[in-house]
């Protein structure tokens, strides 16, 4: 691959990585410890991820169990979960916190699918913007006679192929996540 394209390819890869992170945080009626990845708790004055202060496990399909290494962290972790938008009330027995995920209703599944489609479309737009930036940079090189017209055309074709490939990846990710959400 042309070195002029590599930087744009990396930007597209980052866009897809962000989409994958977003999809990991969408709950599908099953307990997924990645829901907690973005939550931070105050650990001796330092914002720290829950996985940094507790053991997070999934003992059953719809339960996340959080066992803090220090008992005083239970209150902090509970506060972070309640302040977040995951929509689940934690319960604790003084030693561990449990998050019990209810079954998703049909309506909630459809709403989540809409979110999945919206996230996918945002990622497609970001990929197309990267393609536009790449094409603008190539045209500029062509105008300044730094590359020939043939090279310019070849690079633009490669960028288009890369764009098509990345958009296909996004479509596949969205399709897989939708199928996961709609599976009862």
Image: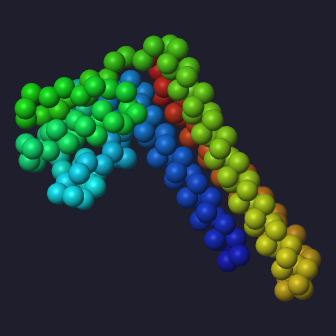
Asked whether residue 58 is in view, the answer is no
The colour style of the image is rainbow
Q: Is residue 73 left or right of residue 103?
A: left
Estimate the x, y position of residue 173 in percent, counting from the top left: 56, 40
Would you place residue 124 above or below residue 7 in this image?
above
Within the image, what quadrant is residue 32 found in?
A: top left
Would you place residue 56 above or below residue 140 in this image?
above
Estimate the x, y position of residue 51 in percent, counting from the top left: 24, 49
- Where is the N terminus found, in terms of image quarters? bottom right
Q: Nearer the viewer, residue 179 or 109?
A: 109
Within the image, what quadrant is residue 149 found in?
A: bottom right
Q: State the residue at coordinates (16%, 38%).
A: 75
Q: State the residue at coordinates (74%, 53%).
A: 128
- Where is the C terminus found, in terms of image quarters? top left
Within the image, what quadrant is residue 81 found in?
A: top left
Estimate the x, y position of residue 181 in percent, counting from the top left: 48, 25
Q: Is residue 182 left or right of residue 87?
A: right
Q: State the residue at coordinates (62%, 58%).
A: 12
Q: State the residue at coordinates (52%, 33%).
A: 177
Would you place residue 61 above or below residue 74 in this image?
above
Asked whether residue 119 is in view, the answer is yes
Farthest residue toward the front? 45
Estimate the x, y position of residue 40 in percent, counting from the top left: 30, 49
Would you place residue 180 above or below residue 103 in this image?
below
């Amino acid at each position: 691959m042309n070195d002029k394209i590599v930087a744009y390819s990396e930007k597209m890869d980052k866009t897809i990585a962000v989409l994958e992170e977003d999809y990991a945080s969408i709950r599908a009626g099953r307990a997924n410890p990645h829901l907690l990845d973005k939550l931070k708790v105050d650990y001796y004055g330092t914002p720290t991820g829950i996985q940094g202060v507790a053991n997070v496990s999934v003992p059953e399909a719809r339960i996340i169990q959080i066992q803090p290494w220090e008992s005083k962290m239970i209150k902090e972790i509970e506060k972070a979960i309640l302040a977040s938008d995951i929509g689940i009330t934690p319960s604790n027995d003084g030693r561990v916190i449990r998050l019990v995920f209810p079954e998703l209703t049909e309506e909630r599944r459809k709403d989540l699918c809409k979110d999945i489609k919206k996230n996918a479309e945002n990622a497609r737009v970001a990929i197309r913007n990267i393609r536009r930036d790449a094409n603008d940079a190539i045209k500029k090189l062509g105008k300044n006679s730094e590359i020939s017209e043939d090279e310019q055309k070849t690079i633009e074709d490669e960028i288009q192929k890369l764009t098509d490939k990345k958009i296909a990846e996004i479509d596949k990710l969205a399709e897989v996540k939708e199928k996961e959400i709609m599976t009862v």
